[in-house]
Amino acid sequence: MKEKTFHFQSLSEFHAFCGLPKPDHPLISLVDYSKVHYPVNEKELRWIQHFYAIGLKRNVNARFNYGQQQYDFDSGVLSFIAPLQFLRIEMNPEVQVEPTGWLLLIHPDFLWNTELAKKIRNYEFFSYAVNEALFLSEKEEKIIVEIMENIQNEYQSNIDKFTQDLIIAQVSRLLIYAERFYERQFYTRKKSNHELLARFEAVLSKYFDKQSISENGIPTVGSIAEELNISANYLSTLLRLHTRQNTQQHIQNKQIEYAKERLSTTTLSVSEIAYELGFEHPQSFSKLFKKKTNQSPLEFRQSFN
């Protein structure tokens, strides 16, 4: 039987599903995670929500991994979910402890007509997978909890013309700290990150094997990330921090390497090489080649004659 996927249009619907009282504010709510009780007894929960969720959770009876590895972090796990994302959580019945923490829910309508409405889309961690959550130190966790409580205190007070601006400022502060803490996480896990980068290079090289290119074409960012079992945005963030280039730029560099090899060792035309490399128009290939090498494909070939 196909697993049921729940849909939550509003914060009130999600509150009701979790057995919680109605939210104090229809568009923003801080939930005590220890009071969340899902009305289903399944090994897996699946849902789509129409609002942002920032979760700080401890002792969760679900699988939280990081890049296929488990870590011995005793503090909280911070995760970010954007509207309309499909969320799947594998419950772990072996964990008997009661989960604790906080869940900050923000409907996009609350951000309407603010700078954050546009800026929030630029935070890539909202599209990281659950297994790429942020592990907080005790000090970091204290900062995040304090900000969340400030938000709650504000919307539970008498609402006036300053309320939205003050809450938006606190949400912005939380996101800036999250970005800082994610960068710390990338750099403090050098061993696992370097292993992942090595796997990335191996996967990319495999894709650019002559037979693989002719049969499967040029890989997409998504296909490489899927093979590494991480999200595409997470892979690009990791590469930018360690190599100053994103995934697409690495793919383009491999395309140029392959093109140089074909230009210098075969008599294939520029158009034929362009089509091999997945370019619909040879002009696009020539433009990229010149951008990367300061030479046209023909100028590069002639330098070998």
Image: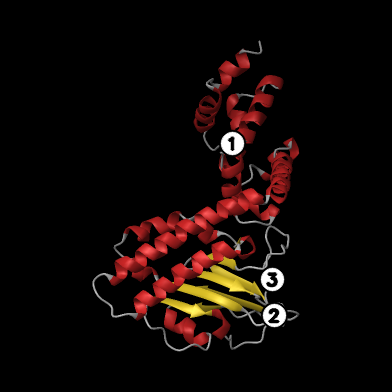
Quadrant containing the C terminus in the rendered view? top right
Residue 8: x %, y % from top left: 48, 78
- Please name whichever residue, 231 or 18, is drawn nearer the observer in this view of the structure: 18
Please say which color scheme the image uses.
Answer: secondary structure
Residue lying at the far top of the rendered structure:
305
Disc 3 is placed on an element classified as: loop
Q: CA distance from mark 1 to mark 2?
A: 42 Å
According to the picture, the residue beneath numbered tag 3 turns out to be: 63
Q: Earlier in the sequence, mark 3 or mark 2?
A: 2
Q: CA distance from mark 1 to mark 3?
A: 35 Å
Q: Label 1, secondary structure: give it.
A: helix
On screen, residue 115 above or below 60:
above
- Dot 2: element: loop
Q: Residue furthest left?
A: 161
> x, y percentage for residue 92?
71, 77
Front residue of 105 and 73 = 73
Q: Residue 35: which disc?
A: none
Q: Amino acid at mark 1?
A: Gln
Q: Residue at x 56, y 43 (%)?
A: 240
Q: Which residue appears at 65% of the width and 51% of the height? A: 188
Q: Is residue 204 left or right of residue 182?
A: right
Question: Which numbered marker is on residue 43?
Answer: 2
Indicate the position of residue 238 as horizontal and vertical percent values: 60, 48
Mark 1 Cα shell of 10 Å, populated few (<14), some (14-19), many (≥20)? some
Residue corresponding to mark 1: 252
Q: Amino acid at mark 2?
A: Lys
Sequence-first disc among 1 and 2: 2
